[in-house]
Each structure stands twice: as C-alpha cells, then as structure tokens.
Image (cartoon, rainbow, N blue to C red):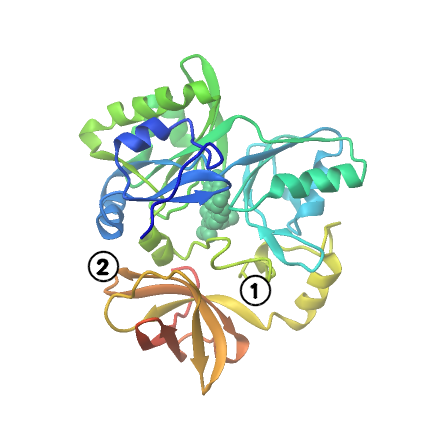
Amino acid sequence: MPELFLSPRVRSTPFSPGVRAAAPKALTVYNHMRLACVFESPEADCAHLKKHVQVWDVAAQRQVEVTGPDACRLVQWMTPRDIVRVSVGACAYVPVCDDSGGMLNDPVAMRLDVNHWWLSLADSDVLLYAKGLAIGAGMDVSVREPDVSPLAVQGPKAEDLVARVFGDAIRDIRFFRFAICRFNGEDHIVARSGWSKQGGFEIYVEGRHNGMPVFNALMEAGGDLNVRVGCPNGIERLESGLLSYGCDITREHTPYQAGLGAYCHPETVECIGREALLREAAVGPSRQVRCLDIGGAPVPQLTDFWPVTGDGGGIGRISSAAWSPEFRTNVAIGMIDRSHWKGGTEVEIHAPDGVRTARIREAFHR
Ligand code: THG
C-alpha cells in the first residue's frame, strides 16, 4: 500500500504525540484530520478492547458549535429528529439531511445549554452547511469549530480508569448523558458514549494545551488496568452494528434507509428535507441497511463497495466487512433492497476474490 502523505492540511490532533509514540500501523483521514485505524492488528486490537481499556484519539470527531438566539432553529433545520425533546445535559444521535432527505452526516448532538449545541461530526463538512444555512437565512447565530477534541476511553475497565482521573462522579453519568468534570483546574465535558459497544466515555478535551496532559494522565493511571492506546475498531463496530458515514450511509441514502427512522419526526418538525421524508415515510423505504454474515474464509479488505445479488439480479451492496474471530464468521453491513432484506435470506456477495454466500441477520443491532 502507498504511504499516506502527511502535511498540515491533514491536521494533527492535540494527542498526536501520544498516538505517534504508540506506532499505529495505519491512519486514515477524517474531517481533514488524522485518525489511527490499527495498532497491533485489527483482531488483536479488538480482543484487547473487549477485555481491558483503550484510549482513542478521536479528535477527528470535530465539533460544530451553534450558539445564539436562533441556535435551536438552525439545529432543527438540519435534522428531522425533534430536538425539543433533547434536554440540556443529553446527547442525541441525529441524522443531518439535505433537501432530498439524503444523509449529510450522522453526528452525536449535545445540548450544552438551551441555546448552545455541539454536533460531534462524522466525516463530512457540516461546518460549511451550517454556515451556509445561517448566512443564507440571516439567522442570529454563531457557527464555529471550537478548540475541542474528543478522547474516547472504551472497554470494560473504562469506568474505573476515567474515575481515577476525573473523580468518582463520572460513575453516575448515564448512557448518552454528559457532565462537566475538572482536570488540572479546567472544565471538560465527559459523556458516556463512544463508537463501540464495550462501554466507555468520551472526554471533550477543551484546548489544545490540555491534550497531552489528559492523554498522559489516563495512560499513567491505567498501568495496572492494561490500558493501551487504541482506535475505533473495524471488527468490533461491525459486530455491534455501528454505522460508518461515507461507507454504510451516504448522501444517496435517507435516515429511513439508514435504519434511523426512530430518530425522524418529519410530521412535527421544521427541517430541511421534510417533504421528501414524509413521502418516504408514507410508503416505507425501498432499501435499508442490514447486518450480514458472509461465509467462507476471512474476507479481503473492502476498499470499494461489493455488489450483492439475489435471484439473479442486483439487490444491493456491501459497504463494510471483516472477519470476526469471536463470531467465527465474516461480519458485514450492506444496503439491501426490500425484496431481499428479511432476516435469514441468502444472497450472493461479489467480493474481489470470488462469489460468496451471505445471510441477512435477523436484527440490525445485536
Ligand atoms: N462519538 C462522538 N462523535 C461521533 C461518533 C461517536 N461522531 C462520528 C460518529 N461517531 C457518528 N456516528 C455515530 C454512530 C453511532 C453512535 C454514535 C455516533 C452510537 N449509536 C448507538 C447505537 O447505535 O446503539 C446509540 C444510539 C442512540 O441510542 O441514540 O453510539 O461515537 N462523540
């Protein structure tokens, strides 16, 4: 594989010195920023994550901050999820849509105050969309990217580790809620969230200068917990059914197709794409994201979508796939037509190394 050429355009993070010292084997670019993908191996990283605790530099989950008198109007415009129901102190998984109902991002929204929101982004330029909408509509808001960098602490020992550094109060934070915690005399938001199903927290480190001090404090406090520098793991997230924007869902897909219909309230909210979403809700989506088990030996790395056929015709595509040592099968996510999306249906996957049989899983989330 060619080397990833780094320059300031591929932004470093406040934790980059710590990540570099841990010698990642692969990096990707996410929101124009570096994001590690593998340390030891995908399989070894996955096994460690399920047993111990890892510290992940996920600063590439950039924040779009929306503040001001029109903050709620702007955030509500961007998502069909009813944000009135999101209370201060809560996180909410929100689809962001364009005028066709196409997904532009799937951020975690956080309500810091009545008129103060952060959108913790997946990989697309929502800052530009938000600025364009606010400027075009003459809204009384400020839209900016604050100097805030999420650091995820994931794994079964995450609570013990975060408590050692930020205090026992973090134990009371419920899933998808956050609290303000102190470190070295400065406030940071700590949420119980993260892109794994092993449990854990995300620390929204305020200020670049606090990056390495927080990172080092966690690594030092976790010596006896077998803490490691890690990163979002491609196997664990497929086993857990967590979606990756740009792979599993794109601008070509609506939230209903992404399986996020529970987070859509187009009947009651003033959002972009409302009419398109109402039309689709009335008839139901024609295709939808599904988890699949793919038979055969471990699949090669998926670098482009793999076609899926059934009964002789094209019925979708695979967007993510990996061998799961725990499940002893290949786990995958794909977009599958309604004709073939029922649990238990067998389909053919056209991987680069040949055709394989796959089975649609019963439930999206395991
Ligand atoms: N944390 C934060 N920002 C993020 C991510 C994150 N930005 C990028 C990306 N991840 C956004 N995508 C997701 C996808 C899934 C979840 C969070 C962000 C997630 N889903 C849970 C699930 O599907 O079971 C819970 C959803 C819910 O109950 O509302 O956690 O990880 N800060």
Viewer-nearest residue: 26 or 267 = 26
- Residue 140 pos. (x, y %): 77, 31
Does residue 82 appear to the left or right of 177 in the view shown? right
Is residue 176 visible in the rendered image? The answer is: no
Q: Which one is nearer the viewer's eye here, 357 or 223? A: 357
Q: Position of residue 359 (x, y in %)?
A: 36, 75
Examine the image and state in which quarter residue 326 appears.
bottom left
Residue 366 screen position, x and y as percent: 38, 60
Camera-nearest residue between 26 and 331: 26
The correct choice, above or below, for 349 with respect to 87 in the image is below
Disc 2 marks a residue whose amino acid type is Pro
The residue shown at (28%, 40%) is 24
Toward which corner of the image does residue 152 lie, by quadrant? top left
Q: Is residue 161 above or below residue 355?
A: above
Residue that label 2 marks: 325
Q: Nearer the viewer, residue 354 or 149?
A: 354
Q: Is residue 158 visible?
A: yes
Residue 257 left/right relative to 303? right
What residue type is disc 1 on?
Gln
- Counting from the top left corner in percent of width and height, residue 135 is at 76, 37
Crowding around mark 2 (Cα neighbors within 10 Å: few <14, some 14 to 19, many 20+) is some
Q: Which mark is residue 257?
A: 1
Q: CA distance from mark 2 to mark 1?
A: 29 Å
- Residue at the image position 73 percent from the left and 42 percent from the top: 133
